Image (cartoon, helix red, strand yellow):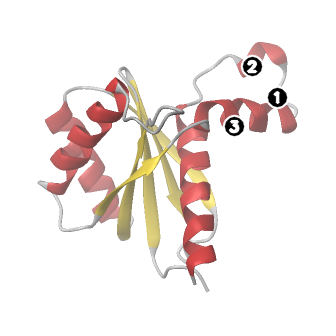
Amino acid sequence: MGTSGRILAIDPGDKRLGLALSDSTGTIANPLKVLQHVSRQEDAEAIAQLAADHNVVTIVVGQAINWDGEVSFQGRKAARLAGAIRAKTEIPVKLWNEYGSTQAAQDARLAMGVSRDRRGGHLDEVAATVILQNYLESQLQQE
């Protein structure tokens, strides 16, 4: 049955934040948009507003965890972003291991037949979609 309600996922980066949104049944992930990074507070406000606009029930922030299970430098930045988002909204914010999401996004582009010269662009919203789909599938397995 899946979770009821939309879920927003964020792939945080230094310059851009990729966003993906699930359908209302919480089973299918779709790219939403890319936000240009401004500051942690302004990014958090923009994310909280988008979540409210789309009636989101959960926000998932991708967190980089190294192969050995340690939280990376980028992962600690993701945790701080999640904290800033929590301060701006009542919607639950969860951290989710994003290990391999960029590689999976590149593989997905390849599988979709995106031409080599168009493949080099930003993967932010595709990576966010991979993070969200992984999260949704894990939730379905728990039911």
Between 60 and 42, the residue placed more toward the observer is: 60
* Residue drawn at the location 34% of the way across and 58% of the way down: 94
- The crowd level at tag 3 (other Cα within 10 Å; few <14, some 14-19, many 20+) is some
Q: Which residue is mark 3?
A: 104
* Residue drawn at the location 48% of the way across and 31% of the way down: 66
Rendered position, 21 above or below 66: below
Q: Could you tell me residue 43's position as x and y percent? A: 24, 37
Q: How many marks?
A: 3
User: Which quadrant of the structure image shows residue 88?
Assistant: bottom left
Mark 3 or mark 1, earlier in chain: 3
Q: Are marks 2 and 1 in contact (CB under 8 Å)?
A: yes
Which labelled disc corresponds to residue 118?
Answer: 2
Tell me the CA gap for discs 2 and 1: 6 Å
In the picture, measured across the screen, residue 143 lies left or right of residue 91, that is right
Q: Which residue is mark 1?
A: 114
User: Which quadrant of the structure image shows residue 135?
Assistant: bottom right
Q: Could you tell me residue 70's position as x and y percent? A: 40, 35
